[in-house]
Image (cartoon, coloured by chain):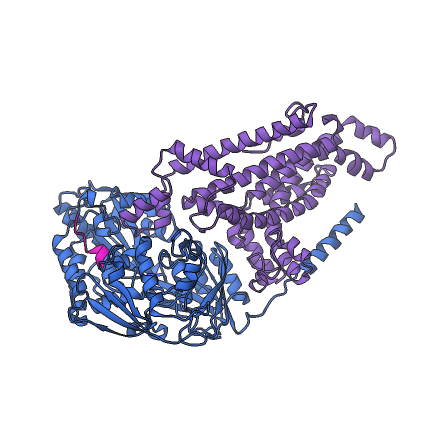
Amino acid sequence: MSKLTSAWAIGLLAAVSLTAPASFADTPKDTLVVATTIDDIVSLDPAEAFEFSGGDLLQNTYDHLVEFDPMDLSAGYQPGLATSWTVSEDGKTFTLTMREGVKFQSGNPFTAEDAEFSLRRAVLLEKTPSFILTQFGFTKDNIEQTIKATDAKTLVITTDKKYAQSFVLNCMSATIGSIVDKKTALEHEKDGDMGYEWLKTNTAGTGAYSLKTWKPNESYVLEANAEYWRATPAMKRVFVRHIAESASQRLLLEKGDIDVARNLTPEDIAAVAANGDLRVDEDLRGRIVYMSLNQKKAPLNDPKVIEAFKWAIDYKGMTETILRGQYTVHEAFLPLTYLGELKDKPYTLDIAKAKALLAEAGHADDVAVKINVRNEPSYMAMAQAIQGTLTEAGIKVELTPMTGKQSLGEYRAREHDIYLGAWGPDYPDPHTNADTFAHNPNNSDEAKLTGKLAWRNAWDIPEMTKETEAAVQEADRDKRAEMYRAIQKEHQMTSPFVVMFQKIEQTGLRKNVENLVTGSAISSVYYWTVTK
Amino acid sequence: MSLTGSRFSGRGAWLPSRTGLLKGGRVVATLAATLLGLLLITFLIGRVMPIDPVLAVVGERATNEVYEATRKAMGLDQPLIIQFFTYIREVVTGNFGTSLLTSRPVIQDIARVFPATLELATVATMIGVALGIPAGVLAAVHQGRWPDHFVRLIGLFGYSMPIFWLGLVGLLVFYGKLDWVAGPGRLDVFFEDVVPQVTGVILIDSLLAGDLEVFTNALSHIILPASVLGYYSLAYISRMTRSFMLEQLAQEYITTARVKGLSETRVIWGHALGNVMVPLITVIALSYANLLEGSVLTEIVFAWPGIGFYITNALLSADMNAVLGGTVMVGIVFIGLNLLSDLLYRVFDPRAG
């Protein structure tokens, strides 16, 4: 026995000494290591990708005709792969001049033909984000006339009617407006798919980085494009690792094994903020958290009952407790920093007022509702807090926790009572949210306008629909902003949407990491600006 | 599906036939029937779940036109039975379909994630066996005294502690504070893709490539999650060893051996443990098979890209091709280990022949 015990002891000692990690004090100066979650990436094809993590990856591997300046996002769109543009008098034809001397990661030169190919394929492939382009009247049948490269330097885009110039160009800066290397895509074409199958797992852009490896749910590696036209990226390689657990991210950050941790809980954020080697950056993102009442379900369609719900939410209390540092109170459907943002917060917690409104409506104690909520900690915490205050106001609430996909199915079928969820803008123009929150041209079940939240909640708004349509065509920027503010004010008063919060992203970083831009409300993360 | 716990009681579960062909045929038929049943059940569960697989692909914003087109492209407009047979037909030709979430063939995904789980489960089982069996023997020999209480306490702790918590505390202490092991992940990022992938098991691939630096790094990453899982396995194995040993130590042949003047070491480690090995094989195989299913929580804490996380993620997103492919893989592992334990059983127990 004693011999055996000694053998074990020696074995264990050997194992421990053998496994002592070859640890790095810090990651190398020209390398960025990021911990985040990437399990939402479904496709890397810009014509299809529509998830947050996919947006981050593509932002760094592709460019657009117009770009934002990451160091001054509020300045709005700037020349990108298009250096200038003119708009015809009728406001329908955009003539864009392409930048010269830009090369794709393959080495192929960028021309207007690539831009034409990229926008056309996004329409032809008919994937989910294609509506961002087809809303300008581009169809399979007219695409050859409406998106056309007239020579290597010129792209002409013709819309079906007049839209605000900013609206059209803002949409071009969305992921779907990414410019793909036509030659490379066609080299990998299968059965006329314009390279779709290949581009789902590969990239072919002019961006600051090229994708070296992608292991789904595990990691991806970006390698700098030394000849990038905007700047030479200081970070030669970017490693992005999927680490779901906040505590694991924090430990890795504290030890210097990663430079950036993007999914930290408030507790871990507090610990990171208190650590002298680390720093916390905050960025206001575009995600809006709201609760909506299905107008097919009485008495949820009673204006007084709707208003009662708005007074029975502890907006401030939640942001000071369960959502501390993660969300800020925001009660309008356009995220702050968007054109036409509305800062008014007309509602606060007032149980007496909510009770009075319910009594006036004749529903003092007979409102019983089910709230569908995603079975995720932050949503469940919100739902429970909401349940508490609604109960105080005399509303009986049953929470139905569901997976994200499950709750969406019921929501899109207009079968819910109340839905508690979030909405993120699709492109950096106010129309993106106005179109879903305040536009419903046909409220019938048959219309199946499942992409619109107003339709999902069966909210019939012919007047507001017209106002939204007018705003998207207004050429004058200030006037347009004013129109959106007016729509939002009315929306706050009359809609069955209880808009509650806007997302704040808190990122933990090593102190030496500078200029990491996570994209604010209008964009995604930029790595080429980072220095260490 | 589970391994048959009654295997060590032995008789008649799989009668040896006279011809190897017949035997082989039976094995294949059993395998096929089990897998078919497994696929059918998983398929049905997947289809009755209140999750819409189309939404997993098209996302929340999709218009109804995009939604319908995708639904059709996925074959979900067909009756359930047709969908199932279409799937089986594809599987028979070796095509498990493409994962909705990763846009890659499921078979490729499994070839990537399963070796990660295999590596972790194997090291964990080695730890569990290497420590669990001696601990169980020690406890049985010293029944009712402090070594026994100690081993039982350790076992009880291993059984009761949530593995998620154990993993986090382990990381905090051994990685965060003591710096004895590396952090989450299979390798430091700088070592990724340094050695060519042959088996997918980094410990083996790095040795094949003769790259000791990668091997050491991989070992420093695996030791903690494997120890956490191994601890759990140790708790089970030591408890079962103790109980089997107590049974054996009360047998007459042990008394005879002692009377014959054999040393206590030989009596315990030779005679008693030798007889305990037969039922222990099943226990170890069971524990190993459970680990091979993937331990989702451990995989999350240690950012270990294994099959547990793959299947769970797929299931929550209604990625049925991935779920079915993963389930078949786990099924094959269970059946394979079942056969292996049968085989070993015959080796250790000549009566079973």
Using residue A174 as the reference point, say whether residue B256 is left or right of it. right
Task: Please name the residue shown 55% across and 40% down the image.
Answer: B330
Does residue B57 belong to the magenta stretch? no
Tell how many labels: 0
Task: Please name the residue shown 16% across and 63% down the image.
Answer: A471
Q: Which percent across, then down, holds residue B114? A: 56, 47
Q: Which percent across, then down, holds residue A479? A: 15, 70
Relative to B240, say whether A61 is above or below: below
Q: Can see residue A383?
A: yes
> In the displayed image of the protein, which residue is found farthest to the front?
A151
Q: Nearer the viewer, residue B261 or B96?
A: B96
Screen quadrant of the N terminus of chain A: top right
Using residue A231 as the reference point, say whether residue B293 is left or right of it. right
Q: Residue B53: which quarter of the image? A: top left
Q: Can see residue B296?
A: no
Highlighted range, magenta: A434-442
Using residue B42 as the reference point, say whether residue B155 is left or right of it. right
Q: Which percent across, then down, holds residue A180? A: 38, 64
Task: Please name the residue shown 34% across and 42% down the image.
Answer: B72
Q: Which percent across, then down, holds residue B2? A: 56, 33
Does residue A436 belong to the magenta stretch? yes
Q: Nearer the viewer, residue A163 or B228?
A: A163
Q: Residue B342: which quarter of the image? A: top right
Q: Nearer the viewer, residue A83 or A330?
A: A83
Using residue A88 as the reference point, say whether residue B110 is left or right of it. right
Relative to B17, say whether A135 is above or below: below
Q: Nearer the viewer, residue A137 or B327?
A: A137
Chain given the colour blue: A
Chain given the colour purple: B
Q: Residue A64: which quarter of the image? A: bottom left
